[in-house]
Amino acid sequence: MARDFRLPDLGEGLTEAEIVKVLVHEGEVIAEDAPLLEVETDKATVEIPSPMSGRVEKIHVEPNQTVKVGQVLVTFADAGAQAGTGTPSGKQAADTLDPTRTLAPEPRTTVQDGRARQAAPPEPPRAPARPGPVPATPATRRLARELGVDLQAVRATGPGGRVTDDDVRSATGGGAAAPAPRAARAEPTAASAPGKPLATHLTEPPLPNFEQWGAVERQPLSHLRRTIAERMALSATVIPHVTHFDRADITELDAIIQRNLETATARGVTLTLTAFLLKAAALALGEHPTFNATLDAAAGQLIVKRYVHLGVAVATERGLIVPVLRDVDRKPVLEVARELGALAQRVRDGKATLDDLRGGTFTLTNIGALGGTGAIPIINYPEVAILGVARARQEPVVREGRIEPRLLLPLSLTFDHRVADGADGARFASAIVRRLERPERLLADW
């Protein structure tokens, strides 16, 4: 019986992807988890593993083709022992690509001696091997291979019968990994009355016939460039942008960086100004959480995130890509620099995963290496603010009645005027400047 594998729902409003490479051939017999396709979506090139084993009967796509969610990519025919394997559901297919978070089983509440007690859920027994593809994310499949665990024999506790990382670890007897500590979340307050949805799109007028004035060439937009264009147009249309300009005296900070370059290199870290900027912004967001939020216009609510995941713009040959560093506020500068270097390299090599590009709460774009005296960047929707940084320059500054050469760094904070006023933006920018000008605070956990 033929079985179709369709492009799963990629999440976060994504409806299509571009085929980069087809890694199998018609007539080839492949195993479950074998590389099947490479697709580019949401600014990342992602390898899709096969969710099932069998013979590839027909390939319905080719490189550079744009496909929609739900479109058939590959049709499989049964191959010997794999006969009887059913077609994966849409949920199973989505779980092989979309690394959504898992939910832990809820503990039971019992009453004993008049007091409520929580009983830990019983240890799940090892599940018997089952036919058909095992729904699991690529990361979970890699973990299973590393630990030598057969996914077919793992008891699944994830949504829709998906095998999670904790399920794999439990199968080895190691149990679930302890979650990282987090700051206490704010208790929810009374919900605000729903607001009216805002208009988000405008219709462009028709273009003139440019050929009447001379020769033209039409060049199709790449999937990445089209994604950038759509998101920038959405942000500029929906969000009323306002920008606050400031400058930071980073003379002492630059001296610290220069003194510690060799030490950091010896520890395998490339120390850059960007790492200190990320740390300063993360700490300032703790003081000004309004800028670490998203506006839900339809509900009339501000969604304030109690985690600080910072996006940093990386220029590549294909276009601007914004990977995300997680929990920057809780990490030392050296660790931020190490993660930043590795993340930027994955992006430039085209090896960034969807997880690398999701979940950002605030974005930094540093064009200092390219020059310029300043810029007004567009907010990375659905965030509400972005920090732009230009090239630092030596300038004469009056200090205690004397003119001294100091290294000044231009900053521009662009934010959503619906959620913050000019005074709010000035205070937030000052909180970043204050930390850059007193670098010992950034190095407290060096």
Image (cartoon, rainbow, N blue to C red):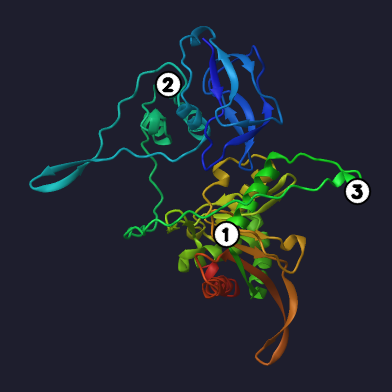
Residue 418 vertical placement versus 7 (above, below):
below
Determine which quarter of the picture holds residue 267.
Answer: bottom right
Determine which quarter of the picture holds residue 378.
Answer: bottom right
Give how far across and how far down residue 214 sits, in percent: 92, 46
Give how far across and how far down residue 268 sits, in percent: 63, 52
Asked which secondary structure carries label 3, the reply is helix
Instruction: Please give left or right for residue 361 compared with residue 261 in the image.
Output: left
Which mark identifies residue 239? Answer: 1
Give how far across and how far down residue 413 sits, in percent: 61, 67
Instruction: Please give left or right for residue 297 compared with residue 352 in the image.
Output: left
The residue type indicated by label 2 comes to: Gln
Marked residue nearer the N-terminal end (3 or 1): 3
Instruction: Single out the mark in the foreground, 2 or 3.
Output: 3
Q: Residue at x 49, y 8 (%)?
A: 81
The residue type indicated by label 3 comes to: Trp
Q: Would residue 86 be visible to someone looking at this image?
A: yes
